[in-house]
Image: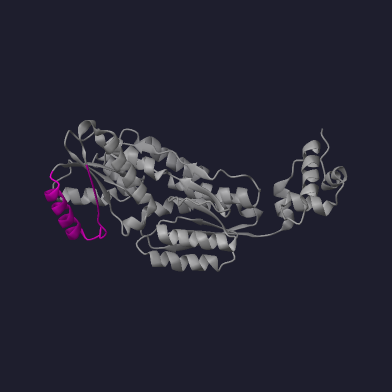
Amino acid sequence: MKNRVRIKDIAEKAGVSKGTVDRVLHKRGNVSPEARQKVLEAIEELDYQRNIIASALAYNRVWKIAALLPRPEEDPFWQQPKIGMDRAYRAVRDYGVTVDFYHFSEANSAEFMTASIEVLEGSYDAVLVAPIFAKEGHDFLDRCHDQGLKYVQINTYLPREDDSFICYIGQDSYQSGMLAAKLLSFGVAEGDTAMILHLEKAVYNSMHLLEKEKGFKDFFEQNPDKSIVFHHTSFEDIFNLDAFSEFLRKTFEEHPNIAGIFVSTSRAFHLVEVLEIMGLSQMKVLGFDLIDANLGHLESNKINFLINQNPLKQGYLGIINIFNHLVLKKEVKQIQYLPLDVVMRENMQYYIKVEEELHLII
């Protein structure tokens, strides 16, 4: 069996002190380029494998992580990443990791800023954030960088180049819009109108919605075979059925050839319920996410397709990647797109079973 290489062995090989070796291993600076190079060469020659877990435990420090997310009670989608984060926390808590949750309303960017200030004042080592508001999200990430606070983005990707950015985990929003358009194109005919509907406030400050819309529009512009007309619109007050019904009535009057609607968030079930009231349940509908309300309408064929964004995995992998980066000092891939699963009535039971197994495994 190969003898274990010690820091002392590396120091002797490199002709430096043990303290210098320790500083190189833990990337703490105050080492000349020449000494650093000698240590790295000695590490390679001796085939040193650092026991990172033992090292982390030996330092007996706490790694504080903040999670900044929309309130799950307002949108069932956000229950899933929180479940994933809880599972990840259970896997890493014995290594001194803590996770604190901060929440804000999806409809209120001021609440996002208030919660983000609390995170910045909390002396955290890293934050996992869904930066759904483009302007406020960039402002927050700028301040994270200024403070040296590492961050992981989920659900919404704001392109960053600073060294505080660990990674993004989630869907490719542009490609998900392209995929939605392609699926919807199978159900609409020559000259029909395909509509993307944002059931969300402050749509044009939401990067992931803008990217979905762009992908949706680009598909039809790049594939003019059926001469399908593109239309986009948004509505905020989804819990006011009368107002939503009137909004849709006017939309259909102005665009009588609408044959299919893509809901850009997890709220397709709201649209289906109003379409039923209006006697338009034959409309082709496509949406996102395997929440119970959507799955019920998928089963009854009132929603034709759902695109699964794997929110549980987003939350789980977000915490795990922070752990790998901070504690294990592993290199982390910055852009981690998750698969865009197409779910329909015929295969929904498979995905429901997979989700149930993930709840047990993760």
Relative side of 132 to 301, left or right: right
**Residue 39 place in picture, x, y as percent:** 79, 45
**Residue 239 place in picture, x, y as percent:** 25, 59
Q: Is residue 117 magenta-colored? A: no
Relative side of 227 to 148, left or right: left
Tally the numbered discs.
0
User: Front-most of 43 and 169?
Assistant: 43
Q: Is residue 245 magenta-colored? A: yes
Where on the picture, by quarter, is residue 98?
Answer: bottom right
Picture residue at 52% right of the left edge, 65% below the top = 119
Q: Is residue 69 visible?
A: no
Q: Is residue 46 visible?
A: yes
Relative side of 234 to 119, left or right: left
Picture residue at 31% right of the left edge, 59% below the top = 201
Where on the picture, by quarter, is residue 216?
Answer: top left
Q: Is residue 46 above or below residue 319?
A: above
Image quadrant holding the N terminus, namely top right
User: Front-most of 175 and 51?
Assistant: 175
**Residue 336 place in picture, x, y as percent:** 50, 43
**Residue 256 place in picture, x, y as percent:** 12, 45
Q: Which residues are magenta?
A: 230-256
Picture residue at 54% right of the left edge, 66% below the top = 120
Coloring scheme of the render? one colour
Where on the picture, by quarter, is residue 299?
Answer: top left
